[in-house]
Image: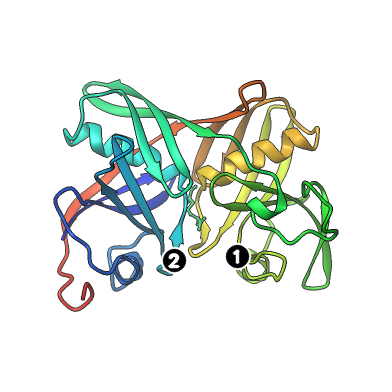
Amino acid sequence: MEFTKMQGLGNDYVYVNCLRETIKNPAEVSKFVSDRHFGIGSDGLIMICPSKVADFEMQMYNADGSRGEMCGNGIRCVAKYVYDYGLTDKTSISVETLGGIKYLDLTVEDGKVSLVKVDMGSPRLAPSQIPIVPENPEDTRIIDAPLEVEGKTYYMTGVSMGNPHTVVYVDDVKGLDLLKIGPSFENHKRFPERINTEFAHVLDRKTVEMRVWERGSGETLACGTGACAVAVASILNGLTEDRVTVKLLGGDLLIEWDKEADKVYMTGPAKVVFDGEIDLTDIDV
Ligand SMILES: N[C@@H](CCC[C@H](N)C(=O)O)C(=O)O
């Protein structure tokens, strides 16, 4: 299988051009290629496929083989791939995902995509749409709501950006033992489809820092949908303005929530790491 390893702020995936390649068992292939010792090393697998309703389709798999509906860093890399590798010459493209069709604007420098702005659509806040089991069945949103994890009470805000997120605010982002608490959030009974958890700290009204524990991949250096969820949560909680720089371990993303249009925009980089090919004879059966 020919592939390209790409990264958006260090959130790295193996990208496969499925207009050309066929993958029979993407869940197994994702687990294999993601392994940082026996595989290529990545946070998952992203297949770039033909679409009947958009310019391309993105199918994403986490490192544990589970399917993600959306991937913010991944979709920027898809845009770079299709432009830089000559699958399109358009600088405004649409990409079908399980989380809806997304619209992307590409900045091209010296013939290559350097920056991508993504219209991420509307955040969904209804508990059933995230999904999060509410404490009271009448709750229409989960904002600053208590959540017991390992005997400690956290306060969460739930947001779907096509995939499920919960945002909790902490005083010390860097000091958290995510390997210990991350899985307890991910598999908590209030999250029937598991969840991506963002641990956030507001630096000022325009800046938030965060770390993420991703459903299916563990701690990653960045999460694009997670950064959008953090911005939306921070705005809803009255902590920031509508345009926020989100600082992740791998770098910064600019997130804007246009409340009138109810659209979230994410702007950030996309990079190629290397191209390669790998033998999948024993895996893709
Ligand atoms: N890293 C991603 C999100 C990938 C999917 C996520 N782990 C899920 O299962 O929902 C991003 O940049 O958004």
Residue placed furthest toward the bottom = 282
Left or right of residue 38, residue 279 in this image: left
Q: Which residue is mark 2?
A: 66
Determine whether the beta carbon of the residue marked 1 sits less than 8 angstroms from the nearest atom of ligand 1.
yes
Three-letter amino acid code of the residue under disc 2: Ser
**Can see residue 174?**
no
Question: Which element is circle 1 on?
Answer: loop
Q: Quadrant of residue 234?
A: top right
Residue lying at 59% horizontally and 64% vertically, measured from the top left: 193
**Can see residue 38?**
yes
Three-letter amino acid code of the residue under disc 1: Arg
Residue lying at 68% horizontally and 25% vertically, measured from the top left: 242
Q: Position of residue 267 (x, y in %)?
A: 48, 29
For the residue carrying disc 1, how many other residues have a C-alpha within 10 Å: few (<14), some (14-19), or many (20+)? many
Q: Is residue 281 above or below residue 249?
A: below
Numbered label attached to residue 194: 1
Q: Position of residue 140 (x, y in %)?
A: 78, 47
Position of the N terminus by quadrant = bottom left
Left or right of residue 159, residue 100 in this image: left
Question: Which element is circle 2 on?
Answer: loop
- Mark 2 / mark 1, whichever is N-terminal: 2
> Disc 2 vs disc 1: Cβ atoms closer than 8 Å?
yes
